[in-house]
Each structure stands twice: as structure tokens, then as C-alpha cells.
Amino acid sequence: MPTHPLPPRVEHVILDAGGPLNAVLPAHIPGEPYVDQTTMTQLVNIGAVYAADVPPPMDKKGVDRALRPKRVAHPDRALPNGAYVRVHVHPNRFPAAVAADWAQRIIDRGHGWVAVDKPPGVPAGPALDNATECATARVAKALQRLESNRDDVETSTEEEFSWYRGAVGGAETNVHALTTTHRLDVATSGVLVLARDSTFAANFNDALRHKRVTKTYECVTEHAVPVGSLEHWTEELKGSVPRRFAMNELRPEDRSRLARQTSHGDDEIEIHAGGTKTGTAADDAFVTPDGRKLCVLRVLSCEETTLGNEASSSSYLGKKYAIKIELVTGRTHQIRAQLAAIGCPILGDVLYGGVDLSDTPGGGTVPRVLRADDRLCLHASEMKTEADSALGPVGTILRAGPPWWRA
């Protein structure tokens, strides 16, 4: 199975003969290159094959989850005649996940959790078509080796690294599943906290919601960013392909609505207008009728900088600005979209108008979703507890190494 990106290809199959999946399915996959039994086994192991004994309806709304197609765990799973199979023949690939030394990237671990310094180009958790080339699967494998004191855990080849046996917790390997607890885009590097059990996940998410944990980011822009608070309302751009988010300035009627929503408690965030406090609102508690959500971040510093050799080897040169940001709310693409909204897109962010720093700049149309080889100058540098939490006592700090552009 190729490790390089291929055009998306998904096949929907109704089996006309039952039997072991990897034996009967290849004959149902048309076209070139030919999908043989070995390739099918690799696709199952990577988590790119789903099946259901009975074909589900086209519209799955309201369909019991037990009846929906599930990711196939074993390539020799027996399927009945008439079974439905979905095959992601060309799954997304993330070679950075395979190349990383995940044991060396563990920052700290505790009861119910592990924190890692995620490299760029790696999904935090499983993708729809690839459940092994992600942080959760790779860190689970690294922990298995560290905690079992065995040297043979990592000896299996990539072809044998099954998403089920290597990440989900099959009894034969005693691997415990890890789950994500917060967002970190594929192209974003830095501190990523993974949960080893549901109790920690719930407690940590509660700490994030109530601002008992703060997150600091570093990024690089082409233009200087004003130090201080940035506040916007966000809404998804309707009909935008690829998916993007717009940032809108607070309007007078928004501030009036915000004033009516003021609250007092440990989950409040400050909203400023011209440097003057106008009220507070709980994160995720204030949403306008048209779906706009409050976005707040604090620009802590902005300094002129020069990128390291790896970044400056690109075709783009010139004066840059190193920005340090404290994220107050946690919306999708928040830092990227807010900086772009004030004319300061992050370098490498071709989705929001940033300069292309990929190995193949200029390839394809823009805006576009970042690829695995895109280099985005955004790094989750630090996470700190502001009160006792599931992550540790007040003052606990998880700090990532330097970002790729300073390495």
C-alpha cells in the first residue's frame, strides 16, 4: 500500500458471496491498481475498512448505532452474503506519525493521562480512513513498550501494526486505548494531553471549561500583531469548501446581549472594549441566534524574528514576527482565523491566506485544507494549571520543546 498521498477513492460494496473479508472482498474492488489480499489486509490494519452484516439505509439519520457500519478489526472476519463493506482504498497517510520517536516525545504522565509533544503533520486521534498514523495509536504503542519493559513490542512491521491490536486494547497485547481531550490540528505541533480513562477525560474537560487550565501558543506572522486582547464572533462560512470560519467584530447589539448574559463564577472570561471591562460570559454559554460564538485570545508578546534554517530554506524570505498567545476560548481554527481577520495570517496557513511553506509551494488552488507536508508556524508551547485539577496541583506546567522553525 503506497505511503504517499493518492486521490481520494472510496468503494461501497455489497458482497455476492460470504466468507473471510480479505479473501472475498478483493474481487469486488474494480480498477487499477489491483487490490489484492495483501493490500486488503493492510487496509484493514490501518482502519480503512468498515462493514455491516446488513446494508444500512442511505440516510443514516435515526438509525441505531448498532446497525451502522463498524471499522473492521480483523482481516479474516467472516461476512455473510449480502453484507455491506465500505473501503477507503486510498486512505490519508501521515508519515510523520511513523517517523516520530514517541517515547522520547512524552512530556509527562500521571494517573489516567499522558502528555506528549506532538510533531506537525500528525493527527491527534484516528481519522475516518486511518486509525494507526495518529498520536493516540502511536503513544499507546510507546507506553506499552515503556510500561512492560519489553524490547519486542515495536518489532512488528508497519504492515502488521493493526489499529485494533496496536491501539484499541485487544486482550492479546494489553494495550490500553487513549482518547483525545482537546483539539490540536494536524499541522499544529506541541502539547497534547491524552486520556487513558474516561474519568480523567471528563475531569480534564471540566477543568478546561472552567479555565483551571490555560494554554499558551507560539506562532509566526508576516505582519506585527498588536499586544492585548482580540475578541470576535465566529461563524462557519456557509457553503465554503474547504470548511472555514469567519471572525466578526463585536457589534453594539452584541455587547448589549453580552451584558445581559454576564455571570459570576470560576468559569467566566473577561470581555474588554477599548481596554475597559464590560462584562463576563461563560465559555460556550453565549451564542447569538445566528450561531456566532465568542472568541477571545490574548496576545502576550510580538517580537521581530528570523526563522531557522529549515523554514528559511523555502522560497519565502523577509522580516517575520514571533507571537505568543494565551488562548482564552477554544474554538475550531480560532487562532488561525482571528489572526487572519486582522490581516496577520500565520505563515504556512494556506487555508486563511498565509504564505505557503510546503515542500511543493504553489501546488493546487487556495484556500485549501492543509496537507500532511504543509508547514504551519503554530505551536502549542505550554499548558499550565491555574487551580488544582485532574492534571495536577496548581502551578503544574507541561512544556513542549521548541517549535520546528526554531529547531
Image (cartoon, rainbow, N blue to C red):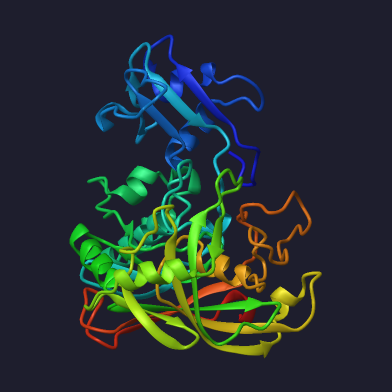
Q: Dividing the image into 4 quarters, which one contains the N terminus?
A: top right
How many numbered discs? 0
Q: Is residue 139 above or below residue 84?
A: below
Task: Say which of 163 and 313 sits in front.
Answer: 313
Q: Is residue 17 left or right of residue 143?
A: right
| Residue 406, quarter of the rendered image | bottom right
Please say whether residue 116 is visible from this viewpoint. no
The spot of residue 240 in percent (x, y) is 60, 47
Which image quadrant is residue 191 in? bottom left
Residue 218: quadrant of the picture:
bottom right
What x and y, as percent, mark residue 102?
44, 66
Q: Is residue 251 above or below residue 52?
A: below
Residue 180 falls left or right of residue 355? left
Does residue 360 appear anywhere in the picture?
A: yes
Residue 302: percent from left, percent from top:
60, 88
Vertical side of 356 occupied by 321: above or below:
below
Q: Residue at x 39, y 85 (%)?
A: 277
Image quarter (top left, top right, bottom left or bottom right) of the C terminus? bottom right
Point out residue 393 in the picture as x, y percentages from the top left corner: 22, 84
Give whichever of 215, 169 is nearer the camera: 215
Q: Of 115 and 180, which appears nearest the observer?
A: 180
Look at 29% across and 54% down and name the residue there: 177
Rendered residue at 77%/52% (across/down): 363
Q: Is residue 288 left or right of residue 312?
A: left
